[in-house]
Amino acid sequence: MRGRPAWMWILLVIAAVGAVPAVMTDPFFLRLFTEALMWIGLAITWDVMAGYTGYLNFGHGVFFGVGAYTAALLIIRAGMPFGLAAALGGLVAGVVALVSGWPTLRLRGAYFAIGTWALNRAVGQLALVLEITGGPDGMRLPPFLRPQFFAWVMLAVVGATFLALWLLLEQAPFGLKLKAIREDESGSLAIGLNPARLKLQAFVLSAVPAGIIGGVYAYWITFIDPSSTLGDLITDQAVVMAIFGGLGTLIGPVIGAIVFFAFKTYFWAYLSDYQVLYLIILGLAIAATVFFLPDGFWGAVTNRLEGRRALRKGLSLGEAAGT
């Protein structure tokens, strides 16, 4: 998608999805709708580092959790309005990414993945022992019983995030620079790029919207604790969604998030007694995707369509040469 048609399609989809809360007012459906949007946002922000830069961040959930705790503290302790608190949650998450990214982004491959996982665990343990965060008892926020409001807010945040990432990663030189790092970091340095600065910018870019989403989640769900906002499952599910959908595509993680959220909802509705099985399925899903769909679902679809177009073009050229 390029130019004006792409803008038209993106805005049309966002507008169509935005009409859903106005039509479907059932609280249970709105809850599922809002959570699905949340996972879409986490999947596409995780893809910034993994899909475009080539760095697997297994601590992405820390930005979500930092945003959630920041917003909760500002709302409870300072009486700050929800919108400002959520925005500052994203800002604090960006600062955490800036500070933690400077040392961790010096690592590569599995070392970076382990380093970011350790960061997530460290922040989670910190939230467990600090009195200000409520420790293991968590924090309870004042309820705001407006399911439609949160559905629209989450859509606005995720929709704006998708548009911003599409502009920066698909339409601007910034995305090409990140892809150059992904393909050959040493080569990108040789052509005049600054990989260290670009990776740090991408890290912060992925963190800020994840923090805002965390802030919205905290006020929406009214209760947070370390396991629900800083647990490994936050990152793990975003990883599965993005890899299944297709890395480096934006639309791929959206598809992956929808498919796996639907599966998650079905699983917990009918197979909640087999919690360990859910983690096993997640692991098998990653392995199967890497083996059978190395480019993800969306990558496989686009590759197939491109192959058909190339075949038709070849046949047309052959017919023209024969005449």
Image (cartoon, rainbow, N blue to C red):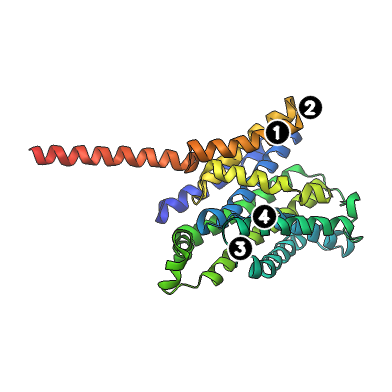
Q: Earlier in the sequence, mark 2 or mark 4?
A: 4
* Residue matched to label 2: 273
Residue 256 position in % (x across, y down):
57, 40
Callout 2 secondary element: loop
Q: Residues within 10 Å of mark 1 (few under 14, many from 20)?
A: some
- Which residue appears at 52% of the width and 50% of the height? 250
Q: Give the quarter of the image for residue 270.
A: top right
Residue 13 position in % (x across, y down):
53, 44
Q: CA distance from mark 3 to mark 2?
A: 38 Å
* Residue matched to label 4: 60
* Residue matched to label 3: 203
Q: CA distance from mark 2 to mark 1?
A: 10 Å
- Which residue appears at 51% of the width and 69% of the height? 195
Q: Amino acid at mark 3?
A: Phe
Q: Earlier in the sequence, mark 3 or mark 2?
A: 3
Farthest top residue in view: 270
- Asked whether residue 261 appears in the rendered view, the answer is no
